Image: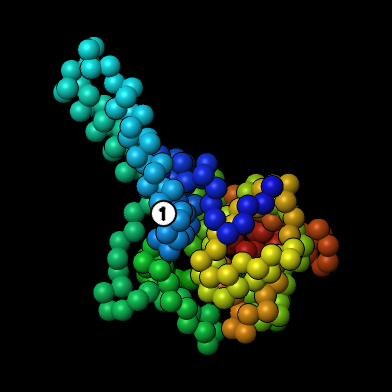
Amino acid sequence: MKKLYHPDIELIKKYESGELEAGLGLLVKTHLNNCEACRVRAESELERQASDFFHSIDTTQTSLDESDDIFNSIFEKVEGAQPKVERNNINGPATLKFHDKTFLLPDTLSFVSDKDISWKEFGENSAVAQVTSGKAGGLFFIYLGPGETIPKHGHHGREYSYVLDGYYSSDGHRLDTGDFSTFEESDTHEPSTTSEDGCLVISWVENRLNFLHGIFAPLNRLLWWYLKRS
């Protein structure tokens, strides 16, 4: 079932415990940096995990040194799994360009300034570009021009998205700048934008999309290969 506007608590728990792939972790971190309500939920979850940890230690059987070793081991595991982002925008905010458009990027995505972004265009004025890839999925920028629509599609795996600029509509729901969404494998949708300057989204996609209608439907596998190749 699709979840709109904010990551659910289970995703926040996995983020705080360091269980997410780095690319998906970046999306969650970007949303948390811009959503106070979700940031409070994340901080509460981290406090709960810390409380559970300390209550699980039987101090009658475990020395303080051993407790410190256990805690440090868990802390290092969590820290190691969280996405690391080096600031490289000392000369100004990080930006992303597509044709004549320049988008400001949040600090969590400042590393993109050092990457050679290869846009693959579709429609009249839309494009997709892969940012990173991993065993569990890939991170993509998706730009939808004004009035354009991505054909109705499902997913072979989950799709997580964060709106960086502008807004788009999906099945009657408007997702605006800063909104986070989760689409399950069983979900279908047909995103379209009426934003005057188009809409820029960053998405973590676990597997290829499955277009259900139109010219893309017979070419699902070939299209996915084309979008992912550098």
Give the side of residue 3 with respect to residue 30, left or right. right
Question: For residue 109, which quarter of the picture?
Answer: bottom left
For the residue marked with disc 1, what is the amino acid? Arg
Determine whether the residue tagged by mark 1 lies in a helix, strand or loop: helix
Residue sitting at 33 percent across and 22 percent down?
A: 56
Q: Quadrant of the C terminus?
A: bottom right
- Visible residue check, residue 109: yes
| Residue 201 image position (x, y, % from top left) | 56, 67
Q: Residues within 10 Å of mark 1 (few under 14, many from 20)?
A: some
- Residue in front for this viewpoint, 218 or 15: 15
- Residue in front for this viewpoint, 196 or 212: 196
Residue that mark 1 sits on: 39
Residue sitting at 73 percent across and 47 percent down?
A: 186
Vertical placement of residue 105 versus 39, above or below: below
**Residue at the left extreme?**
65
Residue sitting at 53 percent across and 52 percent down?
A: 7
